[in-house]
Image (cartoon, rainbow, N blue to C red):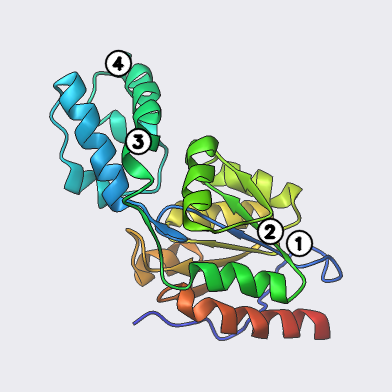
């Protein structure tokens, strides 16, 4: 069972305490269980191209950019075209089968209840990320796509995020670049040990634990 860190507001933290609350969230396996949809899209791509793809292996390591995964299955000179075709197939195959993870809607709502802004920063192609959120009725204030690991930190810093919530060690690295608190959930491919080793400040079992944690965090931030 994952657990929270001992302090809701560890240092260092580079975002001014007086700044409005802004919380960033990853998409795949943080807010959305997209495994069934991603598997369906890879099946369609495999059928169309004739290239065998182990979809179960693919969905066991969701997180890094699409082209990194495609490089396991396609020759280097075909990866870009395969990526373009995958993104074209995605809306018809991936959106309907994907579901909101437990606590996702409540976590966005809690940010708003505290007077804050919720943003989504994801490695996914931005139009497809927005399709997922619209289909599931999850409405963040901003969606920023096609960013991975450290590059996520640039968007988080631009939006003044104090917290970034993700499920992958790459998300921890993005939070670090932004000077944001890294809150990790174990709903993705990385377990608590991996996430803590990467530098996560807080590890939660899933987003059902996040609203209560955020209330404690924000109370401490305002009192500081």
SS category of the residue bearing label 4:
helix
The mark closer to the camera, 3 or 4, is 3
SS category of the residue bearing label 1:
loop
Instruction: Note whether 54 is above or below 73 in the view shown.
Output: below
Q: Write the residue at 13% across / 29% down.
A: 52
In the picture, measured across the screen, residue 70 lies left or right of residue 30, that is left
In this figure, which residue is indicated by the disc labeled 4?
78
Mark 4 Cα within 10 Å, few/some/many (few <14, many 20+)? Answer: few
In this figure, which residue is indicated by the disc labeled 3?
92
Can residue 92 be spotted in the picture?
A: yes
Q: Write the residue at 30% across / 43% down.
A: 38
| Distance of label 1 from label 2 (alpha carbons) | 5 Å
In this figure, which residue is indicated by the disc labeled 1?
14
Mark 3 Cα within 10 Å, few/some/many (few <14, many 20+)? Answer: few
| Distance of label 1 from label 4 (alpha carbons) | 42 Å
Q: Position of residue 65 (x, y in %)?
A: 42, 38
In the picture, measured across the screen, residue 116 lies left or right of residue 62, that is right
Q: Dividing the picture into quarters, in which one does residue 14 lie?
A: bottom right
SS category of the residue bearing label 3:
helix
Q: Quadrant of the C terminus?
A: bottom right
SS category of the residue bearing label 2:
loop
In this figure, which residue is indicated by the disc labeled 2?
179
| Distance of label 2 from label 4 (alpha carbons) | 37 Å
Q: Dividing the picture into quarters, in which one does residue 100 lie?
A: bottom left
Q: Position of residue 222 (x, y in %)?
A: 81, 81
Is disc 1 in contact with disc 2, using a CB cutoff of under 8 Å?
A: yes
């Amino acid at each position: 069972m994952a657990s929270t860190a001992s302090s809701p507001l560890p240092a260092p933290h580079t975002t001014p305490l007086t700044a409005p609350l802004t919380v960033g969230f990853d998409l795949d396996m943080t807010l959305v269980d997209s495994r069934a949809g991603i598997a369906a899209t890879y099946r369609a791509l495999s059928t169309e191209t004739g290239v065998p793809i182990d979809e179960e292996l693919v969905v066991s390591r969701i997180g890094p950019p699409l082209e990194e995964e495609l490089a396991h299955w396609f020759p280097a000179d075909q990866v870009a075209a395969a990526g373009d075709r995958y993104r074209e197939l995605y809306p018809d195959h991936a959106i309907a089968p994907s579901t909101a993870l437990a606590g996702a809607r409540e976590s966005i709502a809690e940010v708003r209840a505290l007077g804050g802004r919720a943003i989504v920063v994801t490695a996914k192609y931005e139009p497809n990320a927005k399709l997922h959120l619209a289909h599931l009725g999850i409405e963040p204030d901003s969606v920023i796509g096609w960013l991975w690991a450290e590059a996520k930190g640039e968007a988080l810093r631009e939006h003044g995020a104090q917290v970034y919530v993700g499920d992958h060690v790459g998300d921890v690295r993005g939070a670090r670049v932004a000077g944001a608190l890294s809150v990790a959930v174990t709903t993705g491919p990385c377990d608590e040990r991996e996430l803590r080793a990467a530098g996560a400040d807080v590890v939660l079992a899933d987003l059902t634990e996040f609203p209560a944690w955020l209330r404690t965090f924000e109370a401490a931030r305002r009192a500081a």
